[in-house]
Image: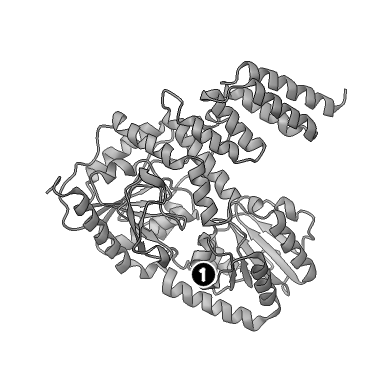
């Protein structure tokens, strides 16, 4: 019996087992394993059609089926179905809801390439509704929280962030820098994280068994980026998400802040705090946060002064405060040579950085990049981030033209070995774009994205303009110098966190003003 035939038989056997017990996640996981081992697309297509006929489309079984299909077929219409089904499952399981949000957020980031598509995909997957459901459920299980009181001055700030991770995790760096800036303004700060991206038993809550692995936060590894004056509270991963939220709300109540600052896309912990304190929001993406906030720090001047209800009627309207500052220029810890990076000394080096490059470099855009590299054999493309996995689309490229590296601790030194920053079509990339700008690299990036927001009018609208600009930069050293100088100046004037203190304090004052308006006369 051939190996191919055995794989097909095992797949059919796993399907029979799953149909007999569709609410058992281990059956779906076994089915996934054998589905991925079968290469015959007709067999796989017939299997999916059979599953759709023989398994439930609602309840826990329907949810497991939809998340399995989203992963196996790489089809986010099933993600939307899973989000819809999830809301009807009783009793409500906060761990499952949070596991789905983590799973869906990662998939969406890997599939969309601009802010408009990102916001629509988040709505399609029912993020606002699911978070609203969690936030209504939380008060039933958690009794301790800060009591509402009159606030006249901002002297103590509680920073809430979904996750703290290992160096050099960009969102963690962003959070620590906000704490440092507030401390420099004379404000007492405490940092609270429930580690919302890790859920106990997460693989068992999803059809294809996905989970999140994040490096542990280590104060020593972050060194001077972690202010010694700050108190840091983290949830214990062995507890359920509700257990962590309850524990953290107790700590926040003891700290008794004058203002809450939410740093991240969303955290259910913010909702009960919004009832009793002014809340300032800073999203890691360039869209409004998915939390109830009084003021959000927007990257684009177009969002400033506008009251936002981007996520529907589940959140109170917030107002945008233009605050583009996102990154502090990192000192170069030690010089790095091209030889150490295995880069040709005479090459013109393009660089892209990010955790998801192996997924983001794909399709027609990757084909255009391959065409460009072939027409410029002296160009090398350096990809930095994650585990340093070569994107499938580039596997046939000569090694002297594409080089991959895992995540690097000393990115400023790496950037200094390169000539042009190339941002793929993606929602993210804003942190790495800003870091490249700080080192004086010209940047090629699309508008309507996190990266595009950093470079303003220098962002391009379409593929034709993108590759035209990149080709021009490759052939012109003068253009590279001019663009690089312009990017470094733009970083200094609009993105450098060290200059953000006055703007941040003004945003805090506006949040307090709006809080007073929405709570008077309740706490007067």
Q: Residue furthest top?
A: 20
Residue 133 pos. (x, y %)? 38, 34
Q: Residue furthest left?
A: 524
**62 over 391 or under it: above or below:** above
Please state if 297 lies on the left or on the right of 522 as rendered.
Answer: right
Secondary element at image label 1: helix
Quadrant of res 131: top left
Query: From the image, which quarter does the N terminus lie in?
Result: top right
Q: Residue furthest right?
A: 1
Quadrant of res 354: bottom right
Can you see residue 209?
A: no
Identity of the residue drawn at 61% across and 37% down: 70
Q: Which residue is mark 1?
A: 455
Q: How many marks?
A: 1
Q: Residue furthest bottom?
A: 478
**517 over 209 or under it: above or below:** below
**Label 1: few (<14), some or many (≥20) within 10 Å?**
many
Q: Nearer the viewer, residue 42 or 407?
A: 42
Q: Nearer the viewer, residue 348 or 409?
A: 348
Residue 51 pos. (x, y %)? 67, 25
Q: Nearer the viewer, residue 191 or 72?
A: 72
Please state if 50 lies on the left or on the right of 79 as rendered.
Answer: right
Can you see residue 51?
A: yes
Identity of the residue drawn at 37% across and 47% down: 291
Residue 19 pos. (x, y %)? 65, 19
Please state if 281 lies on the left or on the right of 165 as rendered.
Answer: left
**246 over 388 or under it: above or below:** above
Quadrant of res 32: top right
């Amino acid at each position: 019996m051939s190996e191919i035939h055995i794989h097909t038989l095992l797949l059919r056997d796993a399907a029979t087992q799953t149909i007999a017990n569709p609410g058992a996640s281990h059956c779906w996981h076994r089915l996934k394993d054998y589905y991925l081992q079968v290469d015959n697309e007709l067999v796989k297509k017939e299997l999916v059609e059979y599953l759709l006929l023989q398994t439930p489309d609602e309840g826990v079984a329907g949810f497991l089926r939809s998340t399995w299909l989203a992963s196996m077929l790489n089809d986010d219409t099933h993600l939307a179905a899973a989000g819809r089904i999830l809301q009807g499952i009783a009793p409500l399981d906060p761990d499952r809801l949070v596991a789905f949000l983590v799973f869906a957020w990662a998939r969406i980031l890997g599939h969309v390439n601009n802010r408009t598509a990102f916001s629509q995909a988040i709505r399609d997957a029912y993020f606002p509704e699911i978070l609203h459901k969690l936030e209504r459920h939380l008060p039933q299980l958690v009794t301790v929280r800060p009591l509402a009181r009159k606030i006249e001055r901002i002297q103590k700030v509680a920073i809430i962030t979904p996750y703290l991770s290992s160096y050099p995790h960009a969102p963690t760096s962003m959070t620590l820098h906000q704490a440092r800036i507030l401390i420099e303004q004379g404000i007492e700060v405490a940092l609270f994280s429930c580690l919302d991206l890790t859920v106990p038993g997460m693989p068992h809550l999803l059809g294809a068994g996905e989970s999140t692995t994040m490096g542990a936060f280590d104060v020593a590894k972050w060194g001077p980026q972690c202010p010694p004056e700050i108190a840091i509270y983290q949830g214990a991963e062995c507890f359920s998400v509700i257990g962590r939220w309850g524990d953290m709300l107790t700590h926040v109540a003891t700290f008794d802040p004058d203002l809450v600052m939410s740093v991240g896309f969303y955290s259910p912990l913010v909702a009960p705090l919004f009832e009793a304190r002014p809340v300032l929001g800073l999203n890691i993406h360039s869209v409004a946060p998915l939390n109830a906030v009084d003021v959000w720090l927007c990257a684009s001047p177009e969002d400033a002064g506008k009251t936002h209800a981007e996520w529907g009627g589940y959140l109170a309207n917030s107002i945008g405060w233009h605050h583009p500052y996102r990154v502090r220029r990192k000192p170069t810890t030690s010089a790095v040579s091209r030889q150490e990076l295995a880069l040709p000394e005479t090459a013109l080096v393009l660089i892209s950085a990010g955790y998801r490059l192996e997924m983001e470099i794909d399709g027609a855009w990757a084909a255009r990049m391959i065409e460009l590299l072939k027409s410029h054999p002296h160009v090398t493309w350096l990809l930095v981030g994650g585990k340093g996995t070569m994107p499938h689309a580039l596997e046939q490229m000569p090694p002297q033209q594409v080089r991959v590296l895992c995540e690097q601790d000393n990115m400023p030194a790496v950037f200094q070995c390169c000539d042009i920053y190339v941002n793929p079509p993606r929602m993210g990339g804003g942190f790495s774009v800003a870091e490249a700008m700080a080192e004086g690299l010209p940047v090629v990036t699309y508008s309507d994205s996190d990266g595009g927001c950093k470079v303003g009018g220098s962002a391009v609208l379409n593929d034709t303009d993108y590759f035209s600009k990149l080709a021009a930069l490759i052939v012109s050293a003068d253009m590279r110098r001019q663009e690089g100088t312009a990017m470094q100046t733009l970083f200094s004037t609009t993105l450098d966190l060290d200059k953000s203190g006055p703007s941040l304090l003004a945003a805090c004052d506006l949040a307090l003003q709006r809080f007073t308006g929405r709570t008077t006369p309740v706490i007067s």
